[in-house]
């Protein structure tokens, strides 16, 4: 049976093929341009970007540097653009559209407008509004998805730590659990004591140099590790930090032939529970309610059995 994600993917590609056909039809009957779509996009960027350089275009359009360079050389040869050395950096050149290039750009813009008019002329007002609303919905959803992907790329995780990192980890955990869950200073003492454990490794996540989260692995036995000190800085929630931290730890354990990972948490930690389940952790023990760190808590043990082949 096809799952929802696969079905969505098929529909997405189906729509993509349909829209590509629409653009192809319009290009054939209206646009009639001597330039490829990529060349047109590059000309658009040069015309509309202040202090435009080849590197700007390469990064914004995610194109190969050599490919961009060849198109710019073609534009120079055809007197569409010209280069000007940067005053601050003689190695770079600013790109400008010539008068001839502006005439070409205006003509391309005019034809692009004709494309839209041709497409919309058979639709009534309600249909046009529905189309615009649908396009806005697609743009909003996909923009949000792209933003999340970019944020995940910006996460840096390192697996070494210093004494300053330990101090910061303790401080961050104390601040979070004291401010959010109102745990008392006995928890701070507990944090200091835990760093006497048999630490195998600690991972620290950073975004733009700022502390974004941490996680640690402590050896329980030769083949069993305990996940500890898992925390995501509230400023960076819902950016994939927690997922990447747990994934780093789990992958390390698999690579080093651990048979099991376990963790202790409390039932109040609602945010982390879906993440533990996502990686396959299951509750194997639940203790009775007791007074701990100034609160009444129920401790839980979660285990993840690893398959090492």
Image (tube, rainbow, N blue to C red):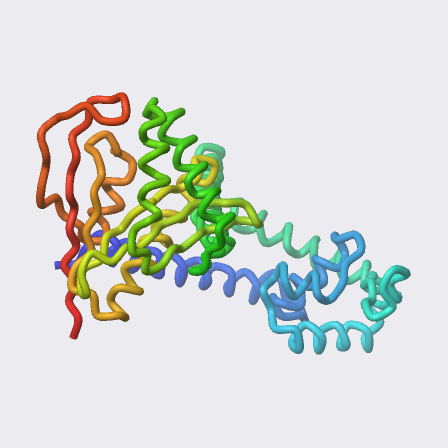
Q: Residue at x 48, y 35 (%)?
A: 129
Above or below, 86 relative to 181: below
Question: Looking at the picture, how far across and down is residue 88, in whole percent?
Answer: 87, 60
In the visual, does 247 lie left or right of 106?
left
- Quarter-of-image position of residue 34: bottom right
Q: Residue at x 49, y 33 (%)?
A: 125
- Front one among 245 and 216: 216
Vertical side of 61 occupied by 131: above or below: above
Q: Is 187 positioned to the left or the right of 301 in the image?
A: right
Q: What residue do we see at 20% from left, 42% from top?
A: 264
Q: Is residue 131 visible?
A: no
x and y percent of residue 59 in the render?
63, 62
Is 215 left or right of 301, judged from the image as shown? right
Q: Kindly tell me whether residue 61 is visible in this rendering.
A: yes
- Pick whichever, 106 or 266, lies toward us: 266
Q: Quadrant of residue 112?
A: bottom right
Looking at the rendered image, the quarter that the N terminus falls into is: bottom left
Q: Position of residue 104 (x, y in %)?
A: 77, 62
Instruction: Provide residue 183's location: percent of width, then percent of height.
Output: 32, 25
219 up-or-down from 176: above or below: below
Where's the C terminus, which quadrant? bottom left
Residue at coordinates 75% horizontally, 59% vertically from top-left?
A: 46
Left or right position of 145 against 290: right
């Amino acid at each position: 049976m096809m799952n929802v994600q696969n079905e969505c993917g098929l529909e997405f590609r189906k729509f993509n093929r349909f829209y590509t056909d629409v653009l192809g039809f319009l290009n054939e009957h209206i646009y009639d341009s001597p330039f490829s779509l990529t060349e047109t996009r590059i000309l658009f960027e040069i015309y509309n970007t202040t202090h435009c350089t080849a590197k700007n275009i390469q990064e914004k359009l995610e194109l190969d540097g050599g490919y961009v360079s060849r198109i710019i050389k073609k534009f120079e040869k055809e007197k569409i653009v010209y280069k000007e050395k940067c005053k601050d950096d003689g190695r770079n050149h600013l790109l400008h559209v010539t008068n001839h290039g502006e005439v070409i750009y205006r003509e391309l813009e005019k034809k692009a407008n004709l494309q839209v008019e041709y497409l919309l002329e058979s639709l009534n007002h309600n249909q046009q509004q529905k189309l615009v609303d649908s396009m806005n919905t697609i743009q909003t959803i996909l923009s949000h998805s792209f933003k999340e992907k970019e944020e995940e790329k910006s996460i840096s995780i390192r697996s070494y730590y210093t004494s300053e990192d330990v101090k910061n980890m303790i401080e961050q955990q104390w601040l979070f659990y004291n401010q959010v869950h109102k745990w008392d200073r006995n928890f701070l003492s507990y944090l200091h004591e835990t760093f006497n454990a048999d630490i195998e490794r600690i991972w620290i996540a950073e975004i733009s140099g700022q502390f974004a989260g941490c996680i640690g692995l402590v050896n329980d036995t030769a083949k069993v590790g305990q996940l500890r000190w898992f925390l995501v800085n509230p400023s960076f929630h819902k950016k994939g930090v927690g997922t990447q931290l747990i994934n780093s730890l789990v992958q390390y354990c698999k690579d080093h032939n651990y048979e099991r990972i376990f963790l202790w948490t409390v039932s109040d930690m609602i945010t982390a529970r879906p993440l533990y389940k996502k990686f396959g952790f299951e509750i194997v023990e639940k203790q009775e309610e007791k007074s701990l760190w100034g609160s009444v808590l129920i401790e839980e043990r979660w285990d993840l059995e690893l398959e090492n082949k």
